[in-house]
Amino acid sequence: MRTLLVLICSLALASFALSAEEGKGKKKEEPKKKAAHAGQVSQPAGKGPGKPTAVGHPAGGHGPSEAGKPSEVGKAKITGKPTGAGKPTTVGKPSGVGKAKIAGKPTGAGKPAVAGGPAGKKFQAQHFNLPSKPSATITSTKFQANRRIQGSQSWQGSNYTVFRNYTSQWHDRTWWSSHYSRIVFVFGGWYYWDADYWYPAWGYDPGYSYYPYDGPIYGYHNLPPDQVIANAQAALQQQGYYRGQVDGLLGPLTRAAVADYQRDHGLYITSAIDRPTLSSLGLA
């Protein structure tokens, strides 16, 4: 009986000792568990407890967050290719500002246009109301037998044959009428027609021998000499060469304008109404 009691007491003591040891073990493990979860963040309301938000995981991601890496602080962000901000926008090459225009090649502003040239328009012949009496300001030339046109021998080409061959002639009315079928009276003088040119008919009527110019005048459109001269004056006026009155007289002012036009257009300076000049003016 005593032996059984001793055995029961021994078992009880052993059980108590075992329980005490287990209690000590649990108390030692609790700090470790608490230390293991010290980095846990308290769960916000509305989410189930026990699933702490992982500090190392970004929301919605599965890989580890790069919290340990600085978010590119200290490293210049490459925002793409610069839009030329650091590069000067070719200020040194202005768009034509620094380049001087070539002023040595004028665009023909000071040179009259050739009205009768290939691209020019034809000058329409007009009929002008002209005075019927000689001009008091323009004197008539004096007759000189066998007079030739000065400088005409150097004018080459068939267009200037009449100028090279012209000589002043004095004949009476009968002689002129028997040699030429067309003779007209203009401004106090008589003119005969021969091979597209008008010439002074010296002596046809001695009382009417007013000739501002002694030489051939090229005729066109079947016009009398005064209308031919008047149209030439109007064409020269248009181009700024002649500034006098359109009077149908080939006086000094008109002859000077014709000479200037011929000089500017590379023609022989005849100072007369010849075929090349009228053609250049767009008349013939």
Image: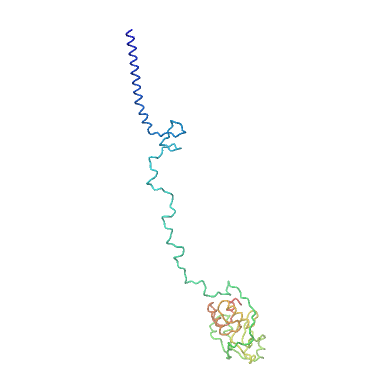
- Residue 133, compared with residue 73, is above or below; it is below
Can you tell which quarter of the image residue 120 is in? bottom right
Can you tell which quarter of the image residue 40 is in? top left
The quarter in which the C terminus is drawn is bottom right
Q: Residue furthest front?
A: 45
- Residue 5, compared with residue 35, is above or below; it is above
Please state if 6 lies on the left or on the right of 240 as rendered.
left
**Residue 119, image x and y in percent?**
58, 71
**Residue 109, image x and y in percent?**
52, 73
**Residue 218, image x and y in percent?**
61, 81
The quarter in which the N terminus is drawn is top left
**Residue 136, image x and y in percent?**
59, 88
Residue in the foreground of this view, choosing between 166 and 276? 276
Labels in figure, total = 0
Residue in the foreground of this view, choosing between 110 and 183? 110
Q: How is the image coloured?
A: rainbow
Can you tell which quarter of the image residue 127 is in? bottom right
